[in-house]
Image (tube, helix red, strand yellow):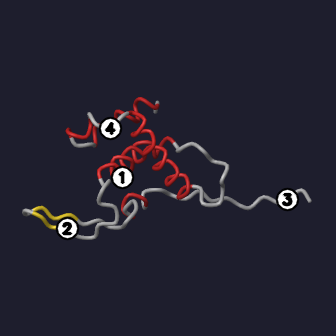
């Protein structure tokens, strides 16, 4: 997926009023944060991987939008106001989103020494 496609996906997840105030640069920052979280989960023992696997690109957009929508209420565990109730599963990305990612494993390679 191209960068502009990812930005479009994120914008589709955002409320209408935030689409105009968030620049592409802001969306890219959150896409980068989401990418790092996905890569860390998918490749826990390989710090050389820098690209999100294609099967997780939509998830990357979902996580970025989730984090953008949560701004200002980070770590909120419960909030009720005028009949609206908000709770967050965790202070970070919910485990229900991260559990979709299957960690990559392999047999350790022997060193040349």
Q: Earlier in the sequence, mark 2 or mark 3?
A: 2
Tell me if 7 is positioned left or right of 18 in this view: right
The residue carrying mark 3 is 111
The residue carrying mark 1 is 67
User: Which percent across, then down, holds residue 93?
Assistant: 39, 59
**Label 2 crowd (10 A; few <14 / some 14-19 / many >=20):** few
- Distance between the Cα atoms at labels 1 and 4? 13 Å
Could you tell me which secondary element the residue under label 4 belongs to? loop
The extreme right residue here reads 113
Residue 40, numbered label: none
Q: Earlier in the sequence, mark 3 or mark 4?
A: 4
Quadrant of image for the C terminus = bottom right
The residue carrying mark 4 is 22
Tell me if 70 is positioned left or right of 53 in this view: left
Tell me if 83 is positioned left or right of 9 in this view: left
Q: How many marks?
A: 4
- Distance between the Cα atoms at labels 1 and 2? 17 Å
User: Which percent across, then down, holds residue 97?
Assistant: 38, 58
């Amino acid at each position: 997926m191209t960068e502009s496609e990812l930005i479009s996906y994120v914008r589709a997840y955002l409320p209408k009023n935030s689409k105009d105030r968030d620049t592409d640069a802001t969306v890219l920052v959150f896409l980068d944060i989401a990418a790092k979280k996905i890569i860390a989960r998918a490749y826990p023992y390989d710090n050389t991987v820098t690209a999100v696997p294609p099967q997780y690109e939509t998830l990357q957009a979902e996580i970025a939008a989730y984090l953008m929508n949560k701004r200002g209420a980070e770590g909120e565990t419960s909030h009720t106001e005028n009949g609206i109730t908000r709770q967050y599963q965790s202070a970070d990305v919910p485990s229900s989103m991260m559990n979709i990612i299957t960690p990559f494993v392999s047999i350790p390679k022997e060193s040349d020494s």
